[in-house]
Image (cartoon, helix red, strand yellow):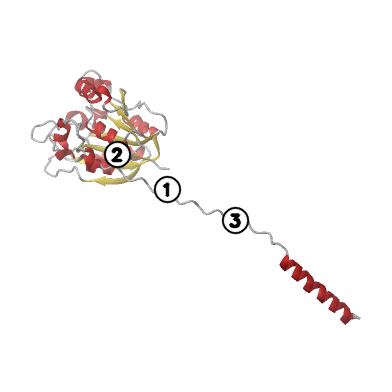
Amino acid sequence: MTTHLWKIAGVSLVTLAALAACSPKEEAPATATPAAAAPAAPPPDYAALLVAPDRIAADAARDPLRHPAEVLAFSKIMTGNTVFEVEAGGGYYTELLSRAVGPTGKVIMQGPKEFDSFYTKDIAARLANSRLPNVTVSSTHFDALEAADGSVDVVTWFQGPHELFFKPSDNPGGLGDPVKSYAEVFRVLKPGGYFVIMDHAAPTGAPTTSGNDLHRIDPMLVKAAATTAGFVSDEESAILANPADDHTKVVFDPSIQGKTDQFLLRYKKPV
């Protein structure tokens, strides 16, 4: 009797197994294949920007000493970027930045109103007839930048941080609080954005007053200010270095003007 029951049970189990094998199986949900990341857009052809047919001749004449293609590459200026150019001066770099970011990008050309007498005519000529339609002009002090929080891809400050210690005759109070000025750059940059600094080097250990007296600054003062503001050092470049500069002459001295020893630093805002 027991053997017979086991036979029946065995037949039943075999039958159930066969039925199970023939029945449709519930399939695991398909796992979506991650989409391949879009390839990064190539950087602009920085060297080609220098030979644009409508470029201002006086700008081109300055290229051999200023190495603009290398500076732009170091600055990581990309098509479509929003660039805030602190202390743009007469616009030598503004024009190159405008062409580098292209029609989908934007350049904010900043300068304190105290410098208007030096650059108004140059800027007007450069922007006349919508030559650079992606450029806007901003006249503020360095500690009050006109840009929304986290809206800028790259901030450049070329030949400029020493001006924080310059005391113009029409405003002996200065052009912006140094600590607040670096904090403003940090504020307007996007996380992961770059802050690129270039300036005339003063002797090591020189006081901040060299910014007024020589229009130079000790690189260590700039590095300390950028780090204090929250930036992380990304890279340094010696492409504008000149060991023959003794650092003691005002930058407008004919023997050194245009050939000063300049430091070039790139910082990054942490993500």
Q: Quadrant of residue 203?
A: top left
Nearer to us of marks 3 and 2 is 3
The residue closer to the viewer here, 219 or 126, is 126
| x then y, percent, for residue 202 | 19, 37
The residue closer to the viewer here, 117 or 20, is 20
Type of residue at label 3? Answer: Ala
> Which mark, residue 30?
3
Classify mark 2: helix, strand or loop: strand
Classify mark 3: helix, strand or loop: loop
The residue closer to the viewer here, 158 or 21, is 21
> Which residue has dot 1 on it?
38
- Residue at position x 35%, y 38% in the image: 228
Does label 3 or label 2 sit earlier along the sequence?
Answer: 3
| x then y, percent, for residue 233 | 33, 44
- Residue at position x 84%, y 79% in the image: 7
Is 225 displayed left or right of 49 in the figure?
A: right
Q: How many marks?
A: 3
Locate the N terminus and report the quarter of the image it occupies.
Answer: bottom right
Work out how far the residue at label 3 is from the one at label 2, CA to CA, in angstroms: 47 Å
Q: Is residue 196 above or below residue 86?
A: below
> Which residue has dot 2 on it?
196
- Residue at position x 26%, y 29% in the image: 88
